Image (cartoon, rainbow, N blue to C red):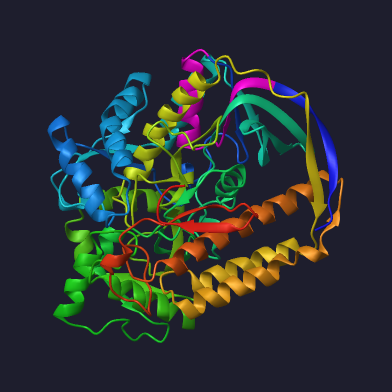
């Protein structure tokens, strides 16, 4: 690959640079500022962005232990649901921190919705076995309260600021090269927190915004951090029409009839299908652990043959005694999308959220000096499946932990260098390559995976890389586009490598050629950069 170096002067220097405008990034920035350190929040999609504020749902479910006595049970359940793939010390830190994090939100004045009938079974979290402390995080209240708090604490906000490369001074991360207002800029810092989200938009159909593309995972890997559980990606039903990319409420599965385009039932009619749909209504994402996997597999296979997806109609009894959780969903759906239960919808399986990512320690450190991470960009606190409502909790808990640890780590750290070098290169046909990458991932790395499909996908991505056709550039937008592509490609390759290594079906990962769980595969798969630049697989954190 031919490159040219661009010298960038340091534009600013803060104590901590936080990257990401979702829940995790917001909480990290607030904690840094609350600890008295100077913080800049860089958000490519602006404040209140990413999967945390995805417009295809009513708000965010947030669950935690139902009192101190429930913590041990939640820890045990996370590990069971995670099929042994969650890191024990991460789970313990996570669960112990949820109640204080929720309490902190309430103290700030954030309005949390409570269930009027919290004993209804619909309030049992996805994949869980009992009721927990359920809260509804409402977007308007979060924006108002957290926005005011950021301003009060003097957090500097850089909207539309996309991080392209982490800058290191020796082994320590000391800043980032960003694209903002069409210019490349070097932002210096003494510590940096990555909160850039997951990698759902590596797939053609995704229930997340376009910027959730795995950029942070690739940047951390490049800087020397490890990744874990990258093969475990939540896939779940979403709307094709009307209101494309709206999240389908899984609690309604027990009230639905599923049909192909020609009107024939997707599943045989009878008590067995009713039993499977009732089981399927207990969880949102696909899982290989439960018999309800048959519903998702049939749905996924039918949608590969029929572009309009599978048609959903609701039984009349849904209206007769609609549970509160489902009422909340349909009230929002009618108000925001104009859709009522009487209107047929068309659904497919979409990529939703990552259960894996950057391997962090309980203090949110990555093993790379000066680099911390939090939120969906990370892994270890979840396993092969994740309990519903814990993604939000993850952002709250480890956002605060990362901010506190980053602020503490930057004391007595010298200023970053006054400039840095950015290797500038461009690549042709990037829009076409991105579409092709999404097609490859959608074909071979959704809920049906096999060695043959994963191998073909890897070879296809290698062809798409086509590094020999790169050329030097000093154009900031060309350089940014090439870096964006390189990060997406790296993260996609990490997903494929981990999926090929896991020669079994476990949780969200399903292999047609290895349809059962294999006890010999009972370790998380870690990835890191090898000495020669390639991605290396290990079964323990390097």
Left or right, 518 with reference to 321:
right
Relative vertical location of residue 473 with respect to residue 446 in this rendering, above or below: above
Is 31 colored magenta in this rendering?
yes
Position of residue 355 measured from the top left corner of the image (x, y, whole percent): 40, 52
Residue 292 in which image quadrant = bottom left
Q: Is residue 449 magenta?
A: no
Left or right of residue 228, residue 286 in this image: left
What x and y, as percent, mark residue 306? 48, 81
Placement of 150 over or under 373, stated as above or below: above
- Is residue 153 visible in the rendered image? The answer is yes
Front position in the image: 48 or 10? 10
- Residue 117 visible from this viewpoint: no
Q: How many marks?
A: 0
Residue 522 sits in quarter:
bottom left
Residue at image location 57% in from the left, 73% down from the top: 457
Does 436 sit left or right of 391 as displayed?
A: right
Picture layout, residue 469 above or below residue 13? below
Q: Quadrant of the N terminus?
A: bottom right
Question: What residue is shown at x 74% (from left), y 31% (from top)?
Answer: 186
Q: For this rendering, which residue is in front, 345 or 73? A: 73
Q: Where residue 39 sits in the image (x, y, percent)?
A: 58, 21
Is residue 78 depicted above or below 466 in this figure? above
Residue at position x 43%, y 74% in the image: 449
Using residue 140 as the reference point, say whether residue 106 is left or right of it. left
Residue 7 versus residue 210: which sits nearer the camera? 7
Q: What residue span does the magenta drawing correspond to?
A: 13-36
Where residue 79 sits in the image (x, y, percent)?
25, 50
């Amino acid at each position: 690959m031919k490159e040219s170096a661009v010298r960038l002067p340091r534009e600013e220097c803060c104590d901590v640079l936080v990257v990401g405008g979702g829940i995790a990034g917001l909480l990290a920035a607030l904690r840094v500022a609350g600890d008295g350190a100077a913080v800049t929040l860089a958000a490519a999609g602006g404040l209140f962005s990413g999967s945390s504020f995805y417009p295809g749902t009513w708000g965010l479910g947030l669950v935690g232990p139902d009192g101190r006595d429930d913590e041990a049970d939640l820890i045990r359940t996370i590990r069971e649901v995670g099929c042994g793939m969650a890191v024990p010390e991460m789970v313990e830190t996570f669960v112990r921190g949820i109640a204080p994090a929720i309490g902190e939100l309430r103290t700030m004045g954030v309005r949390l919705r409570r269930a009027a009938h919290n004993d209804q079974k619909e309030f049992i979290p996805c994949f869980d076995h009992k009721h927990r402390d359920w809260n509804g995080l409402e977007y308007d209240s979060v924006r108002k309260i957290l926005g005011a708090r950021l301003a009060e604490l003097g957090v500097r906000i850089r909207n539309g600021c996309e991080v392209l490369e982490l800058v290191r001074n020796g082994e320590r991360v000391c800043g980032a090269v960003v694209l903002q207002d069409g210019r490349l800029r070097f932002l210096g810092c003494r510590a940096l927190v990555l909160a850039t989200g997951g990698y759902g938009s590596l797939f053609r159909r995704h229930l997340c915004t376009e910027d959730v593309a795995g950029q942070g995972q690739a940047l951390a890997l490049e800087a020397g951090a490890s990744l874990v559980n990258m093969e475990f990606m939540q896939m779940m039903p979403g709307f094709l029409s009307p209101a494309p990319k709206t999240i389908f409420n899984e609690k309604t599965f027990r009230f639905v009839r599923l049909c192909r385009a020609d009107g024939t039932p997707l599943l045989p009619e009878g008590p067995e299908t009713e039993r499977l749909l009732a089981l399927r209504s207990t969880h949102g994402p696909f899982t290989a652990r439960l018999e309800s996997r048959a519903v998702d597999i049939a749905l996924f296979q039918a949608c590969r043959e029929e572009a309009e997806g599978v048609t959903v109609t609701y039984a009349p009894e849904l209206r007769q005694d609609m549970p509160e959780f489902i009422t909340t969903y349909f009230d929002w759906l009618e108000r925001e999308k104009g859709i009522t239960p009487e209107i047929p919808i068309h659904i497919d399986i979409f990529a939703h959220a990552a259960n894996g990512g950057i391997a962090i320690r309980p203090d949110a450190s990555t093993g790379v000096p000066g680099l911390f991470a939090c939120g969906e960009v990370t892994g270890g606190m979840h396993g092969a499946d994740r309990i519903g409502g814990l993604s939000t909790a993850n952002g709250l808990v480890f956002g605060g932990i990362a901010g506190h640890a980053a602020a503490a780590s930057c004391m007595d750290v010298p200023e970053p260098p006054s400039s840095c070098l950015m290797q500038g290169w461009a690549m042709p046909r990037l829009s076409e390559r991105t579409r092709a990458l999404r097609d490859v991932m959608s074909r071979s790395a959704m809920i049906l995976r096999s060695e043959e499909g994963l191998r073909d996908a890897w070879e296809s991505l290698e062809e798409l890389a086509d590094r020999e056709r790169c050329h030097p550039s000093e154009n900031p937008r060309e350089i940014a586009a090439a870096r964006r592509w390189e990060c997406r490609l790296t993260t996609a390759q990490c997903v494929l490598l981990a999926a090929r290594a896991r020669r079994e079906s476990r949780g969200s990962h399903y292999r047609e050629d290895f349809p059962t769980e294999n006890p010999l595969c009972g370790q998380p798969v870690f990835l890191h950069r090898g000495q020669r630049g390639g991605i290396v697989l290990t079964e323990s954190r390097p």
